[in-house]
Every structure is written in C-alpha cells, then in structure tokens.
Amino acid sequence: MIADRFETFLFDLDGVIYLGDEALPHAVDGVNRLYEQKKQIRFLTNDPRPTREAVASRLRELGIRADEEEIVTAAWAASAHLRREGVATAAAVGSEGLRTELRQQGITVTNESPNAVVVGADEQTTYADIRRATRHIDQGAQFIGTNPDGSFPTPDGPAPGAGAIVRAVETATGTSPTVVGKPEPLMFEVALEGISLDQDAVVIGDNPATDILGAHRAGLTGILVANEAPVAASARDFTHPDAVIRSLAELFSQTVTPWDNPQYSWPEDIRPGVGAVVLNESGEVLLVKRADREQWALPTGTVERGEPVEEAISREVQEETGLQITADRLTGVYSHPHQQVFSYPSGETVHFVTNCFSCSIDGGTLEADHDEALEVGFFDTDRLPSQILPMHPQWIADAVEGSTVMIA
C-alpha cells in the first residue's frame, strides 16, 4: 500500500487536507493514521501570506496534531533558502507573515541597501512596493520570488497572486528571479532538510501543474487527489501523476509505482534548432569547440522568429566559423529528451527539436568567432575528438552514410 511504501509524506493543503474552512472527507483520519505509524509528515503551501504557526493552528483546529516545524509555506521556504545562502538583510514585498518568517531565520528586514528582495504578495501590495523592489534589484540585491502562482481563487473570482507581482518586477528589472514555491524543486529540498535521505518521500497534491510537476522535478513520486486521472499530452509528461486517489483513505488501500527519475531536467521551453554537417573536399567534417561546454560539436543553433530553417543554418555556420554554406539535404530530425534537453548555467532548461542538414561550402574564411566557438576545424569522420557532444557522432554518421532522413 502507498502508506507502507513511503516513510515521508509531503501534503499540499488546499484541495487535499481542506477546502475553504472545512476538512475534506477522510483527510483528518488519514493524516492522523500516518502519525500513528510514525511517518514523517510535512504540509506544503504556496500561500506566502501566513506564518507557519498560523497554518499549524488551523490544522489543529481541524483535528490534525501538526507542529509548526512540519509546516512549509512559500514565505518560510524563501526565508530558509536565504538563511542557507548566508544572506543577512532583505527587503520584503508582501505580508507581515513573510516579514515574520524572515526575522525568525535571523534575517534583518530593511529597505536600506538589502542583500536580497523577497517578492510575495498580499491584499495590500501596491505599485509603490513593485517600484521599491525594482529599485533594490537594480542596485544589486538578489531577486527571490516566493511562488509562481499568477492568481488565487476568491468568492468574487480570481485575484492576482504573488506570481503576478513577481512577473511585474521581473519585467521592470529584466532580471529573472529565484522562485522558491511549487513547482520549483527548491521548496521540496527545503521541506526535506533534516530528513534522512534513505527515507523515501512522496508528494500528495491536487494540482498536476504544481504538486505533481514539482514532485517529479525534485525526483519524488507524485500522487494526485482527484476523481479521475488527467489526460497527459505525452507519456513523458512530468505533470502526469504516478497514482490517482479520491481521498486520503486510499493511501491505505491503493498501490503506486514510484517515480522513475529520468536523466534530464523538465524543460521550461521547446525550441526549433538546426545543425550542420559540413564536409570539405577531403570528406572531413567541420566541428566547433563550444564556449558554453568546452566540447567539440557540429555547428548548431536556434531558428529565430520569422526565419526559414535554411537561412538559420547558413547564419549559424557563418557566425560561428566564418564559412558560407548551402544546406543541400535534410539528414535527420532529432528530439529525444535524453539527448535534446539542455540545462544552461543561467538555470534555463530547453528542449530542442533539431533539423540537421548535410551542407556544402560556398566560400568564406575559416575562423572561430571566440564568442560561441573557441576553436574550429575539420576532422576525419573516423577519428573524431574524444571530447565531442555524445549524440553528434551519430548525426555525422546519419549524414555521411544514409539517404533516408533519420528521426530520433
């Protein structure tokens, strides 16, 4: 059973434990039964407004014997992250609860040259708060967002959430924040701090886009509380739950196949790419030593908006190597995530669908641009450098040996 398979349970709150002011059926009994079995329990919420003590008090009123230390709010997680990073001072946009959590982590809340700005939101957040955060970030403060939720439900309809304020500051500053709340892995890492790594953990949530995606990005099994399973766009979709239960009572009657963590990160974006297999008169292949990875590779790049693929491949080769080429033949379309998902030092993760062409040289002078390419040169296709991107030897072989377009 699910309850027997795991030692640590990370519960979302709204939609799993309660709905509005009422506990959901079997929620209180289910959680307390896990307590009786000596399970480790954490309660996670993206709401950046309350303190941990306020959330624990609410759970106790419902009949769940929760302690403050078991509560993980977006505000507390952001504060704990700053404490782990050694940040001493921070400005806050949001509730008094956010300021309280910062102070309890030993962080001084100030608007005088803070080391960081933590952007959340409450009903009193104003344009002046957004301007204040923008000024601090422009002056060098770290930019922390409590959570990415653009809105939250109210009886009168959706209201702007912290994510809306975070994005406003991001747009104003041109700076990407470190976001803590679900579905970012950081919230789960903070929640599991102090829990033994050999105690398997599971996430129980009601939102595939935050709870389940966040669980899988953190390498954890994700179980959805819902009346029926959502339809996934792809078998590899990280938002697809490992199991679906209708209530917490089914933790003690249903089974689950734990998440098998793939060897790639979940991409925030998918982009069309191009790759060039350029051969000289001796049949040698053109390679560049990439500045971002310091590995040899075929010339590759991204198709820009409004740009035909043929122009994209010509532009990329000329920018990186100085050669003018013609794309003669499509030799492969490569999209498998194990090879085509890339994570960059900035934190951005992209899934590329790369169209690879066999190309001929028209002119130009071979020279590395020293921006994207540190070195350029031609290599015997049977004696490629050892430090080459692992998928590119196959791309070269597909272009040299076959007349059929490869799809992988």
Image (cartoon, rainbow, N blue to C red):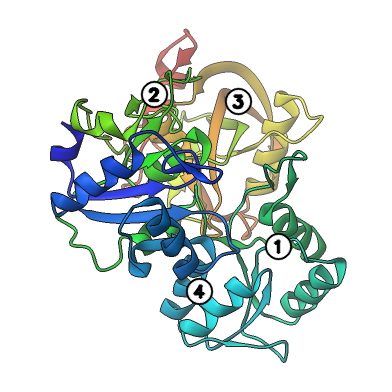
Indicate the position of residue 104 as horizontal and vertical percent values: 47, 83
Give how far across and how far down residue 288 sits, in percent: 52, 47
Q: Gap between marks 4 and 3, in whole Å? A: 53 Å
Residue that mark 4 sits on? 79
Q: Nearer the viewer, mark 3 or mark 1?
A: 1
Disc number for residue 397: 2
Of all residues, the one furthest to the right in this rendering is 127
Q: Secondary structure at mark 2?
A: helix
Q: Amino acid at mark 1?
A: Asp
N-terminal-most mark, 3 or 2: 3
- Residue 190 placement: quadrant: bottom left
Distance between mark 4 and mark 2 Cα atoms? 51 Å
Mark 1, residue position: 122
Query: In the rendered structure, are the residues bearing label 3 and label 1 in contact, judged by CB atoms less than 8 Å apart?
Result: no
Q: Residue at position x 52%, y 69% from top? A: 51
* Disc 3 packing (10 Å; few <14; some 14–19; many ≥20): many
